[in-house]
Image (tube, helix red, strand yellow):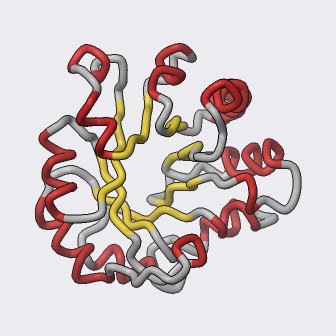
Amino acid sequence: MSDIICVTARNLCDGDFLQQIEKIAAASPDRIILREKDLPESDYHVLAEEVINICRKYDTTLMLHYYWRTSIELDCKNIHLPLHILREISADEKGSFECIGVSCHSVDDAVEAQKLGANYITAGHIFATDCKKGLAPRGLDFLREVCKSVDIPVYAIGGISPNNIELVRECGAAGGCVMSGFMKCNAPLQYIRKFEKK
């Protein structure tokens, strides 16, 4: 099992998205977050059904994203949410999930997410990345502070690569999240191996 999370973005995928997901799921990342923020919920529901089936085949943990009602409908017990949605859902609704991940952008966000029941958080963006063009990265000192502020796993996001993953781990992070690297690589298993601890 890797400490690297794949975050999807089908618009970055050069080939067939579901074929790429199959290759990634077979490579056993820590989990896959099916992000696809541009899709309306009905289209996301259709895509999620297909990705759930692929991930089950490889016993790879899948986190659906944002559309928590769709996640409940599809009996997917894992959801990744922005903090503002976690604030809004009830204790009963949270109880539908075995794992809740939350995107955080400050120490206060991280502390609040933990109090609201998050099982892990993603913190970023840490390094410069094309996904956040023109936005200054928050950097390693920010990541270190977030990791110190909570007792749940923290995964760094934003510009994470095999070249800087050790810096992330040294800050206390449980691992890192990668988007474009996974969407563009032909051999996800070899790619994940580049992140292995030296």
Q: Residue 110, image x and y in percent? A: 20, 55
- Taking depth in this image into account, of 195 and 130 the one nearest to the observer is 130
How many labels sit on residues?
0
- Taking depth in this image into account, of 183 and 37 the one nearest to the observer is 37
Q: Residue furthest right?
A: 15
Task: Using residue 189 as the reference point, say whether residue 80 is left or right of it.
Answer: left
Q: Please give the name of the residue rendered at 57% of the width and 17% of the height, measured from the top-left corner.
A: 74
Task: Using residue 30 as the reference point, say whether residue 60 is left or right of it.
Answer: right
Question: In terms of image quadrants, where is residue 43?
Answer: top right
In the rendered view, would you say 100 is above or below 42? below
Q: Residue 81, image x and y in percent? A: 39, 41
In the rendered view, would you say 139 is above or below 119? below
Question: In terms of image quadrants, where is residue 109?
Answer: bottom left
In the rendered view, would you say 69 is above or below 185? above
Task: Using residue 103 as the reference point, say whether residue 4 is left or right of it.
Answer: right
In the rendered view, would you say 192 is above or below 198? above
Q: Please give the name of the residue rendered at 69% of the width and 33% of the height, measured from the top-left corner.
A: 51
Q: Please give the name of the residue rendered at 28% of the width and 25% of the height, measured from the top-left corner.
A: 89
Q: Residue 45, image x and y in percent? A: 65, 25
Q: Please give the name of the residue rendered at 43% of the width and 66% of the height, measured from the top-left corner.
A: 157
